[in-house]
């Protein structure tokens, strides 16, 4: 995705409004990738998890020249869960980068934050020694893969 030559969206879509919104949102991400593709990898993500999403959302909102109240409410309500999730990601990354959590405790801390802020429990039988946060934190994955 970062080779600055080829940008694609792989998506199983149908002809419906919600899939069009997702497509336009993803095109916003691609615009972001294209603008920053020449920078070092560390600078290709936003300052926090919410910034990159805001770029995609801004492009999506532009597809509604005269949105109804119903549309605006639907768009706003869809974003509410992202507020607490963005906080969880930043709190987790902060402690990890500052070495305030032992490596073996990272996953448990991730789920503690999810319980506290979102009321979400890990799935039954989940691999407690795994690292579930890596599925959402690209910058952490890149750092650990080096």
Image (cartoon, grey):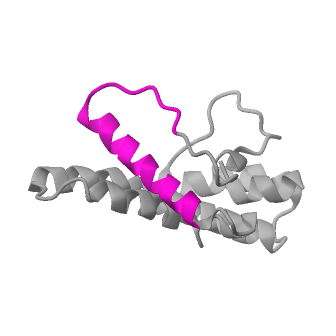
Q: Is residue 30 magenta?
A: yes
The residue depicted at 44 percent of the width and 63 percent of the height is: 55
In this rendering, the answer to whether 125 lies above or below 4 is above
Q: Position of residue 93 (x, y in %)?
A: 70, 65
The residue depicted at 32 percent of the width and 54 percent of the height is: 60
Q: Please indicate whether residue 95 sits to the left or right of residue 76 in the image.
A: right
Q: Position of residue 135 (x, y in %)?
A: 67, 44
In this rendering, the answer to whether 20 lies above or below 117 is above
Q: Please indicate whether residue 1 sits to the left or right of residue 100 in the image.
A: left
Q: Please indicate whether residue 110 sits to the left or right of residue 68 in the image.
A: right
The image quarter in which residue 88 lies: bottom right
**Farthest residue in the front direction?**
5
Is most of the magenta stretch helix, strand or loop?
helix
86 or 21: which is nearer to us? 21
1 or 146: which is nearer to us? 1
Quarter of the image for the C terminus: give it.
bottom right
| Magenta region, residue range | 9-35
The residue depicted at 77 percent of the width and 52 percent of the height is: 141
Q: Is residue 100 magenta?
A: no
In this rendering, the answer to whether 127 lies above or below 34 is above
24 or 76: which is nearer to us? 24
The residue depicted at 79 percent of the width and 70 percent of the height is: 97
Q: Position of residue 26 (x, y in %)?
A: 45, 47
Q: How many marks?
A: 0
């Amino acid at each position: 995705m970062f080779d600055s030559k080829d940008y694609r969206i792989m998506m199983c879509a149908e002809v419906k409004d919600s899939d069009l919104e997702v497509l336009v949102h993803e095109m916003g991400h691609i615009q972001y990738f294209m603008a920053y593709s020449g920078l070092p990898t560390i600078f290709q993500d936003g300052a926090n998890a919410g910034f990159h999403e805001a770029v995609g959302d801004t492009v999506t909102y532009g597809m509604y020249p005269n949105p109804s109240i119903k549309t605006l409410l639907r768009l706003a309500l869809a974003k509410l869960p992202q507020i607490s999730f963005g906080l969880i990601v930043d709190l987790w990354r902060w402690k990890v980068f500052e070495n305030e959590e032992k490596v073996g405790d990272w996953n448990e801390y991730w789920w503690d934050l999810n319980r506290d802020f979102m009321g979400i429990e890990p799935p039954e039988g989940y691999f407690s020694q795994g690292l579930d946060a890596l599925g959402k934190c690209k910058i952490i994955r890149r750092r650990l893969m080096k």
